[in-house]
Image (cartoon, helix red, strand yellow):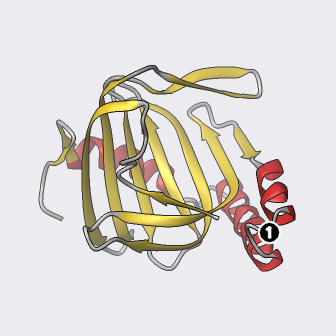
Amino acid sequence: MKRKFGDRANWRRITNRKFTCRYIQSEAFTGYVTLYTMLNLKEPLWKTYGSHTFCIADKGYSWLQYYPKDEHYVVTAMFDDKHQIVEWYIDTCRGQGVTDQGVPWFDDLYLDVVVLSNGEIFLVDEDELEEALEKGHISAEDAALAECTAADLLKAIDAHVFPYFKMSLQHRAEWFHNGEFRRRQ
């Protein structure tokens, strides 16, 4: 199982970054919210989903990430250098936590949901989930949790009750300026 950290301190592609994190407790959301801003990098990162190829990491891009308390997923809203949404990437996870230094982390369960800015939805990394199960990196229970979580996410998205699309656009505009929290939460 892969443990992923919100500050992506080991991501060699990024040569200069800004990272900020807050714990939020409100009616709409309880958990950690982070903003990872890419100031300089070795090379952009491009992804292809279906017939669409686009950049998800480049100079000036930022990733707003939600770690909802007691959930088995983490939501990353990826914004370009003009603060326009590129995609939402939703990782399934076994659990979440925070380091002694205050950096949120999650134990990745490989299976992910991607929602493009045009509304197209993709279930991705099913092969990685199967390979992790075959190699014993995760248990059958972990694989079932990933599949159940992804199915629940897809249902919520389809029913238009998944709150993170609107929330992330609003929060990116209201909360952050120059990669820092604009106001106290």
Residue 9, image x, y percentages: 36, 48
Task: Judge left or right: residue 80 versus residue 115.
Answer: left
- Say which residue appears at 74% left-offset and 74% top-offset: 142
Task: Judge left or right: residue 42 versus residue 172.
Answer: right
Residue 20, image x, y percentages: 24, 52
Q: Is residue 113 above or below residue 179?
A: below
- Say which residue appears at 74% left-offset and 46% top-offset: 124
Task: Judge left or right: residue 21 versus residue 128.
Answer: left
Q: Mark 1 — residue? A: 136
Say which of 165 and 136 sits in front: 136
Say which of 125 and 74 sits in front: 125
Q: Is residue 44 above or below residue 11?
A: above
Displayed quadrant of residue 24: bottom left
- Say which residue appears at 71% left-offset and 54% top-offset: 158
Say which of 14 and 82 sits in front: 14
Task: Judge left or right: residue 114 versus residue 61.
Answer: right
Residue 3, image x, y percentages: 53, 62
Please name the amino acid that badge 1 sits on.
Gly
Q: Secondary structure at mark 1?
A: loop
- Say which residue appears at 61% left-offset and 67% top-offset: 93
Residue 183, image x, y percentages: 12, 55
Count every numbered label the image shows and give the total.
Answer: 1
Q: Within 10 angstroms of label 1, few (less than 14), some, or many (20 or more) residues?
A: few
Quarter of the image where the C terminus is located: bottom left
Displayed quadrant of residue 119: top right
Quarter of the image where the N terminus is located: bottom right
Q: Is residue 54 above or below residue 28?
A: above
Q: Is residue 42 above or below residue 164?
A: above
Displayed quadrant of residue 22: bottom left
